[in-house]
Image: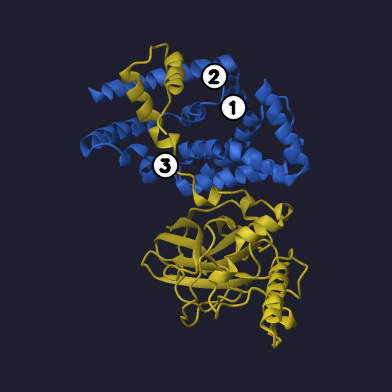
Chain colours: A yellow, B blue
Amino acid sequence: MPPTNDRYQRYAESLGEPVTDDLRAFVDGLDAPFIAPVLPDALARFTPSAHLRDQESRTMSLPPKEVLPANAPPLRADRSPRSRVSFGLVAALVLVIVVAGIFATKQAHLPPGSQGPQAVRTPTPMATATPSPTQILPPTKVYVRCLTISLQQPTSAFTNCAVVPSATRVPINSLVNFIYCYTADIPLPSALINKVTAPNGQSVYAPGTLQPGQPLCDDSGTHVDQKGQYTVQIYWNSGADAGGQTDPATDPTWQLQISAKFTVV
Amino acid sequence: MAEAAQEMLLVEAARNDPHAFDALYERYVRRIYRYALAQLHDADEAADATQQTFLRAWQSLKRYQADHSFAAWLFGIARHVISTMRSARPATVSWERVPEEAHPLAHTGNPETVALLHESQTRMQQLLRRLTPDKQELLALYRDDDLTVAEIAVILGKNPETVRKQIARTLKTLREHYHAANQ
């Protein structure tokens, strides 16, 4: 969207000049980069807290069930046992599957704290590489809303990263802490991977699984021993247990949510 | 005036129903993002600042008083968020960090014209970079067509007439330097 005549007029009035081609060129040069930037996917919608939960937004947060392959991890472990019962009549079987599917979907979307016992989430180094099933996933950069780099170690995972001062330059051989917070409507359970790439290009991964009822922030630490720029990237996967997976940068089931850089001096 | 009343209705609705905040978000998200991008020159940081701005606005919506426009209040929050983010990183930021897709002219016209325009814009950005941070901020707010000088004054906590003069002075200086650089 190019600047409008009104826009040129606004500048002309401030400068006390008429609108001329020269003025238009000046305004274009001044403003063009910021007039119509592409709105990032991260800003496609506002998802601030559990107060905004509703059936509609929860449905939008999940991939359609029909695109999940047969070996996809279950979104929720405690599906109705009725879905495993075999019936003679095809019509009855279809009906039961539909009912069980609706029930399982509702279970998968219950608010945090309303499901079973919480699992302890501890980021650990990655193990073997196993490809994840291919899925069509919802828009990126929706669930993780902030990532802060901090020298505090350890930092409480309960800390809101928005209130922790972020570091962009850290001394070599520091222990650097990454705090990342996500929105309340992240589908649960799902998985996040914290990928840290050192200046020499080597990466370290710390996967973790998010369970209902857990705090909306997590943290992960790393020791930095190379001078130069490090990159931190948080990837999300709707799979319930995505630990020990392949490189999230090349596995399409992982979606980059947020990234940040810092420099080791 | 009618628009202000309509906006107040949106605010009241959002206070009572979080879903109603969507309307305010839709109305302002692009403007806040543009402002953040003009200040931070980094698409990811601008997106982050925009999200934080709306999060804080949503959390403190009950405290909003209609003494000033909602736009002035929201941009004030954005200003604070951006200021915090800027103070947490190195003072100098390369203009090359402005994302390529943010240059709409880079995708249109014949290559020669595009190159000339791009060169002209780059020159302008270099001149902008030489401005003091408060003048850069002033122009970042002035870029928003829908913000009045009075609202900019509220956001900056200054007298409207002072702001008006500062805008004119800054633009004139920039224009002189731009002409000089083009000759």
Q: Nearer the viewer, residue B95 or A12?
A: A12
Three-letter code for the amino acid on which mark 3 is drawn: Thr
Q: In the figure, is residue B148 to the left or right of A18?
A: right
Residue ID for mark 2: B163
Three-letter code for the amino acid on which mark 1 is drawn: Leu
- Work out whether B149 lies above or below B101: above
Please report contact status of discs 1 and 3: CB closer than 8 Å, yes or no: no
- Foreground tag (1 vs 3): 1
Q: Quadrant of residue B169?
A: top left
**Mark 2 to mark 3 CA distance (whole Å):** 26 Å
Q: Which mark is residue B21?
A: none
Instruction: Answer with mark 2 or mark 1, whichever residue precedes in sequence.
Output: 1
Q: Quadrant of residue A71?
A: bottom right
Tell me where residue A152 appears, x and y as whole percent.
60, 60
Helix, strand or loop at mark 1:
helix
Helix, strand or loop at mark 2:
helix
**Mark 2 to mark 1 CA distance (whole Å):** 9 Å
Residue ID for mark 3: B92
> Does residue A77 appear in this view?
no
